Amino acid sequence: MSPSLQNSYKFGFYLRAFGVSESDLRNEDDGVVDETRTQVYVPNDFVWQETNRYPALLYGASINPYRLDALERLTAAHANGAVSIKWIPAIMDIDPADPKISPFYQALAELKLPLLIHVG
């Protein structure tokens, strides 16, 4: 769990809103979606399919960099035409300063994909 998230005044709000405890979060650091506790989840495949139906829309994927298959998902999203990657660190429990995700940043740079981060 990210120390910066844990120290945020919003941390308790997010725990209550999503019905999880701190110990639950510690057991979920592999980046995989916990569908039993996720209130809204839109798979990348759905976003890709729907944006391809409308020429004015662009495909942006959401990939948790802690997933074991994060780099493969990033490569696949790029191959499918993703123009950006999106994170919501406070909800996805991503610490953008975590050195463990440096390979993900490197891959983003190599693919020339911008990273959109929702904060605050």
Image (spheres, rainbow, N blue to C red):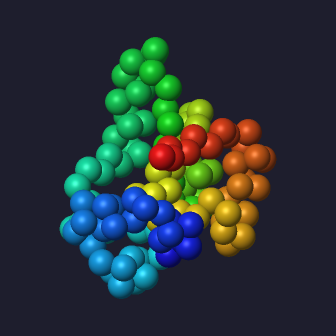
From what the image shows, is residue 56 above or below residue 26?
above
Q: Residue at x 67, y 59 (%)?
A: 104
State how many labels appear: 0
Is residue 91 toward the left or the right of residue 63 in the image?
left
Q: Residue furthest front?
A: 9
Relative image position of residue 63 (x, y in whole percent): 51, 54
Foreground residue among 46 and 62: 62
List x then y, in percent, for residue 111.
Answer: 72, 43
Work out which residue is located at the far top of the displayed protein and give it: 56
* Viewer-closest of 90 and 63: 90
Q: Which of 91/58 is in front?
A: 91
Does the image show residue 79? no
Q: Is residue 47 left or right of residue 110?
A: left
Which x, y percent locates residue 113?
67, 40
Using the rendered image of the protein, determine whether residue 12 is visible from the camera's viewpoint.
yes
| Spot occupied by residue 110 in the image (x, y as percentages of width and height) | 78, 47
The residue depicted at 50 percent of the width and 75 percent of the height is: 1
Vertically, is 88 above or below 114? Answer: below
Question: As rendered, which of 56 and 66 lies closer to the eye?
Answer: 66
Instruction: Write the residue at 34% across / 67% down.
Output: 12
Q: Quadrant of residue 39?
A: bottom left
78 lies left or right of 112: left
Residue in the image at 32% along x and 46% along y: 42
